[in-house]
Amino acid sequence: AQSVTQLGSHVSVSEGALVLLRCNYSSSVPPYLFWYVQYPNQGLQLLLKYTTGATLVKGINGFEAEFKKSETSFHLTKPSAHMSDAAEYFCAVSDRYTGRRALTFGSGTRLQVQP
Amino acid sequence: EAQVTQNPRYLITVTGKKLTVTCSQNMNHEYMSWYRQDPGLGLRQIYYSMNVEVTDKGDVPEGYKVSRKEKRNFPLILESPSPNQTSLYFCASGRVGQGGEKLFFGSGTQLSVL
């Protein structure tokens, strides 16, 4: 069975500082990998995804993530945090080979950005 | 505008009183799914549907029912709600295909069962 671990339920950074949100997964075969963001009182929005090809994936709002198979990781980064980045971030994986399309989510990391 | 619409946004009910949470999408997606979100657990899939009249259980289906009579609608039914079903619920839709495709989420329904 797949699982996703997000290290740190809360991360606080200063505006302009580097954002690093960690995600590790366990899966018998390389899955599809996603980062979703949830702003207060809203549904989830896709930030970026990795399916195949280049392992460094760029998403919206200046975020990017790198798939490292050897480390089973898919950490999310942004060079310079903005106040509007304050939200909850979810890493998720999806099995490549079933039609269930179920996303297995991590428990989420709440990002705070201090002025 | 492409969207997934859930109603109601907030719902407070009592144990045993049947309720339905509606979900509708305007993107002609074949695939729809329900998730519940609980603190520290992330989101967990309840049920999903690959097309009209095709539904199947997710990871936490106990106590829930769904139906898919029309392509755009996928209601979630709680026949006899219990307090452990107090949660934040999300509906999602997407195209059927490989698992790497984007899912669109509704804004959520906060349910409290007293």
Image: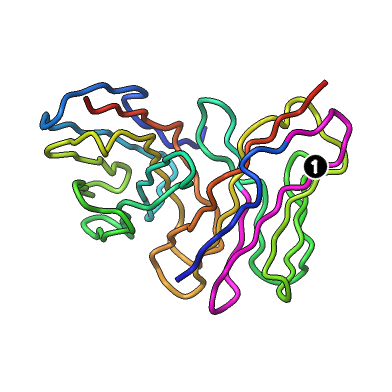
Q: Position of residue A46 (x, y in %)?
A: 60, 46
Is A7 placed left or right of B6 in the picture?
right
Say whether residue A19 is left or right of residue B51.
right
Kind of residue sitting beneath label 1: Val
**Residue located 61% across and 61% down the image:** A33
Q: Position of residue A102 (x, y in %)?
A: 43, 59
Determine the image quadrant of residue B31: bottom left
Check if residue A50 falls in the magenta segment. Answer: no
Q: What chain letter is assigned to the residue under label 1?
A: A
Q: Residue at x 73, y 26 (%)?
A: A84
B110 up-or-down from B79: above or below: above
Q: Quick one: B114 or B70, which is closer to the camera?
A: B114
Which residues make up the magenta segment? A12-35
- Above or below — where is B95 with respect to B104? below
Quarter of the image where the C terminus of chain B is located: top left
- The x and y percentages for residue A9 are 61, 42
A21 and A54: which is toward the camera: A21
